[in-house]
Amino acid sequence: MATEDVTIRDKPKSLPPYPEMILKAIEALNDKNGSNKSSISKYIESIHGELPAGHSVLLLTHHLNKMTESGELVFWKNNYTKRDPNAPPRRGRGRPPKPKVLLPTGMDLAPARPRGRPPKDPNAPPKPPKMRVSTGSGKPRGRPRKMARPSGGLGGSVTTVPASKATGKPRGRPPKVKAPGTGVSVQQ
């Protein structure tokens, strides 16, 4: 019985909710540009005395961020102010989103097209094959084939032979050749 009385007497008086304390602090400080976090914290500490251990670091910061996200407060140049009901909303950074056009009631939208290339129609007639268009000069396109050297003199016949067969060299990089006498010999 005695322990219950001690806990009731030692219990600190209850604090009002943090959003309420923050709004009262901003109203009381009445700064033109708003109040920063440290001034709000000092005001709450001076009015309410004993506060929880992580008051300014955790609780106050958490509630200020929540109130800013919900729109109760405006955070501008490191100061918090109450939102003016007549002021237009502040634009964020970047390009504003396009306004959505409302369609009149009763108007149905066509179903959205699926992604990707549409499938071929199996009932469509086959397309005629493409005809090759010549350049008009009579020469084939591209680089001409390499010609072998004439072997029969100036008047000999010229035949097309691949370069590797014409010179007699194999293709690719030749194997590394070790010079004789570079081997190490051990004599005793």
Image (cartoon, helix red, strand yellow):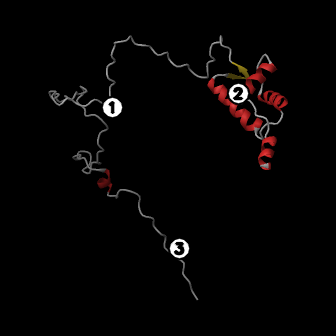
Give how far apart the Cα atoms at labels 3 and 2 are: 89 Å
Q: Residues within 10 Å of mark 2 (few under 14, many from 20)?
A: some
For label 1, the residue is 116
Which of discs 2 and 1 lies nearer the camera? The answer is: 2
Q: Amino acid type of disc 1?
A: Gly
Which sits in the foreground, 86 or 134?
86
Q: Residue at x 46, y 16 (%)?
A: 100
Q: Point out residue 35 in the picture as x, y percentages from the top left corner.
A: 78, 23
Q: Quadrant of residue 18?
A: top right
**Which structural element holds mark 3?**
loop
Q: Secondary structure at mark 2?
A: helix
Which mark is drawn over residue 18? none
* Residue 46 coordinates in the image, percent (x, y): 85, 30
**101 left or right, relative to 41:** left
* Front in this rendered view, residue 26 or 180: 26
Identify the residue position indicated by label 2 in the image.
19
User: At label 3, which amino acid type do we have?
Assistant: Thr
Label 2 with label 1: CB-CB less than 8 Å: no
Residue 78 visible (yes or no): no
> Residue 57, how many percent across, how many down?
75, 37
Of the image marks 3 and 2, the number of the one nearer the N terminus: 2
Residues at discs 3 and 2 in contact (Cβ within 8 Å): no
Report the side of 26 relative to 67 (left or right).
Answer: right
As drawn, the residue found furthest toward the front would be 1
Q: Which residue is mark 3?
A: 182
Name which of mark 3 and mark 1 comes first in the sequence: 1
For the residues carrying marks 3 and 1, which lies nearer the camera in this image?
Answer: 1
- Element type where label 1 sits in the image: loop
Q: Where residue 170 sits in the image (x, y, percent)? A: 34, 58
Q: Is residue 64 above or below residue 164?
A: above
